[in-house]
Each structure stands twice: as C-alpha cells, then as structure tokens.
Amino acid sequence: MILQSDTGLGRDALRGALQEALAGRNLHKILILPPDYTRLYSGAGILTAMVYEMLHETCEIDIMPALGTHEPMTQAEWTAFFGADVPFERMIVHNWRTDVVKLGEVPASFVQQVSEGLVRDKIDVEVNRRIMDKDYDLILSIGQVVPHEVVGMANYSKNIFVGCGGSSMINSSHMLGAFYGMERIMGKDFSPVRKVFDYAQEHFLADVPLLYVLTVTTSEQDETRIHGLCIGNTRDVFEQAVSLSQQLNLTHLDRPIRKAVVYLDPREFKSTWLGNKAVYRTRMAIADGGELVILAPAVRKFGEDAENDRLIRKYGYVGREKILRLVEENEDLRGNLSVAAHLIHGSSDGRFTIIYCTKELTEEEVRGAGFGYMPYDVAAAKYDPDSLPDGFVTLPDGEEIFFIHNPALGLWTVG
C-alpha cells in the first residue's frame, strides 16, 4: 500500500491506511519498532500512537524503539514523541551490546563482491532476541526513509539490523560503508551495506511476521508533513519510498557552498555522534577550502554511550587515512569499528573547516576532538537560527552563507 500527497497526508488518511493494513489479522500480541526521539521529524510518533489506540484494548503491545547505539528515551521524550496516551511502561529498551542473538552470517565472499573487494570479512547477523520471539503475531517496523551516510537511504531492514541490531553487525556494517565511501553511498539505494541487509533479511528473517510502515517527510516551521506512507513487507514498497525521498529530501545546488551554517535542534541533538549529520549531509556541497559552522546549543558529549564517547575523545575526527592506520594499531578502536567509521564520517579530511559552536562542551574538548570552536552565543548572535531562512542568504555585513535548519531531513549536493 502506498499513499502520497504533495501537501502532506492528513490524520484520517494515515489512520485509514493503518486500519487497512491491520484488517483481518488475528492479533493478540505485537511488537512495534519505532525510531527514537532523534527521529523527531519522521512522523513515526503519530503513527505509533494511532496503532496503539486501535489495538491496545484487544491486543498486548510492546514498543521497542530502534535505538541502535543511541541512549534510551526519557519519559519526557517519550511523551513528546508518542503523546500522553501511549504508556511509558510499554517501552522495552534495546541494548545493542547484550540483548541480541546471532542468526547467522553474511559470507565473506558476498561482502567482498558487493564491496568491490574493499572488505573481505564475513558479517555476523544479530538482532534483538525479541524479534525472534514466536509469541508475537506481528512485528511492526515504523520509520522514515531519508538519505543516510552508512546505508544510502535509511530505514526498511536497517531498522532491524542496526536499530535493533548487535555490536558486531553495527560495527561491521558501518565500517563497510566507510571503506566504500560516503560519497558513493549517500542518497542511493543498492549500496554495499544495503545489499548486506537485503541478504540478511532474505536468509534469516523470512519467517518473521514483519510489516514495514515507511514514511517520507519534510518539515517547515517545526511542522512535519508526511508526503509518503508505504506499507508492506516487500522490497518494492521500500523502493517506492526511496524514489519519493530522493525527490523531496535531496537538494541539488548549481554551485558549491563557501560557508554553510547548520543548526542542531536541541531536542534532537545532544552529541556529535548525532550532530555530525551536519557534516555528513552537507559535505558533497561544500567547496574545497570552505567552512562549516555548526550551531549546537545542546551538544554535551561526543558518543551516545560512555565507551564510544571515550574513544572519540581519545582519537578525534582526524580523517580517513589516519583513522584507518589507528584501527590497525589500536585494539580498542579495532574492537569498535562503528566508532572508527563515525570518526571517518565526521571529518572533512582537511577539505573544509568544521567549527562547532557549543554551550556545554568546552573549547578544549571541542578542539581536542579535532574541530574548530566558537562559543554558541557568539555564533548565534551572528547567525540567528530563529530568523534565518533555509538556503543561500546574504547577511547585513555582506557575507553569504547557506543556512540549514535541519540536516537530518536532507542531503545537499552540487550538480
């Protein structure tokens, strides 16, 4: 089932589509896998709430946000995202380090083939053990299709294998994407990582009662519009969402950006692990020798958990070639390849300058991680996120910038 609207689908249309998708199913217990609060503009909060409203009187419902490596949602975030009628007590916290089972392996020969020989190791397929629990009549994976730096286009089986995956799967898939190269992946389907996920879904999830609910959204003045709702369990449903997202979430510029200024919504972005979307999503549009200024009022740490944070502080965003050498030389980084991949993604490789403007991280911390620094209040006084429109803007002093309110909703390129 696929619904589309240029102006955004209304609640009645969304509810009707969900009712049709769930009709005729004998449901006693279901597991919902929505994103967490860092996908604030996915539209998944309202869809999860609708499903809960429809079924909770006749069906036991567990809700396990697809956290991946992110920190668990607070009760305040839960209520802001799903609404007051979805009980916080229904939340199951996914632990990517301990709460998983291994289903099998993607063979080394397959990984070598899809990576054009760049990676030659097998990849363990791990998912949260609840996904394999036969007590569930339905597992409903809800999330947004949008350009992504590791897999090309986010969601679909990524919600299972990364959002609800284990450390080995997350580490290996992220490093596969980093080896292959972000610029070759972002905004595209059929990346090497996506092919690995396709293999894993076909070989290990065929008997799992999965149903995907995929959104394509835009946001304007804090209002999320769901332009596409694609529901099903086959790849063509995902491909329809990919096509629509490529139309709505990719911005092709006719000239490179000399200075980009990107704002990180304090509700979503509290770490550089997430905030570096400002880097990933703009890097193909920024000119050599250019500058990226990141307004990060709530960024207070680097990693989403303590170990990742420690490793990022230790090694820093020092560029692809140096990180690859550090992986070879250091066991702690070699054992946490998703961190190594993240450090590659978060560097400009010296091609342009990255300046983080923070309140809660000190100048010493920011510079120690390999970034330039500016106090947030100083930067916000010059680049007011509440008044600047998206796109090219000429400031009163004559400086031209390219302003982005929300890097999580798009990908910017030249040409």
Image (tube, rainbow, N blue to C red):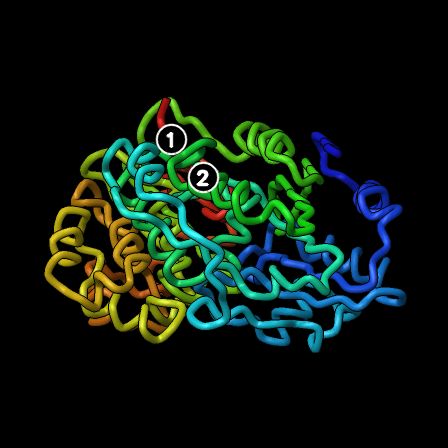
Give how far apart the Cα atoms at labels 1 and 2 are: 21 Å
Image x and y of residue 102, in percent: 46, 60
Q: Residues within 10 Å of mark 2 (few under 14, many from 20)?
A: many
Q: Is residue 204 left or right of residue 209?
A: left
Identity of the residue drawn at 63% across and 74% down: 76
Mark 1 vs 2, N-terminal side: 2
- Residue at x 56% of width, y 55% of height: 39
Secondary structure at numbered mark 2: helix
x and y percentages locating residue 223 in the rendered image:
66, 49
User: x, y percentage for residue 259?
Assistant: 30, 41
Using the image as rendered, state which of residue 411 and residue 157 is in the foreground: 157
Tell me the amino acid under the disc marked 2.
Arg
State the residue position of label 2.
194
Q: Nearer the viewer, mark 1 or mark 2?
A: 2
Residue tagged by mark 1? Answer: 413
- The picture quadrant where one finds residue 369 is bottom left
Is 95 displayed left or right of 344 in the figure?
A: right
Considering depth in this image, is 287 or 312 the residue closer to the camera? 312
Q: As drawn, is 12 to the left or to the right of 297?
A: right
Quadrant of the rendering where the C terminus is positioned: top left
Q: Decide if residue 345 is on the left or right side of residue 300.
A: left
Residue 398 appears in the figure: no
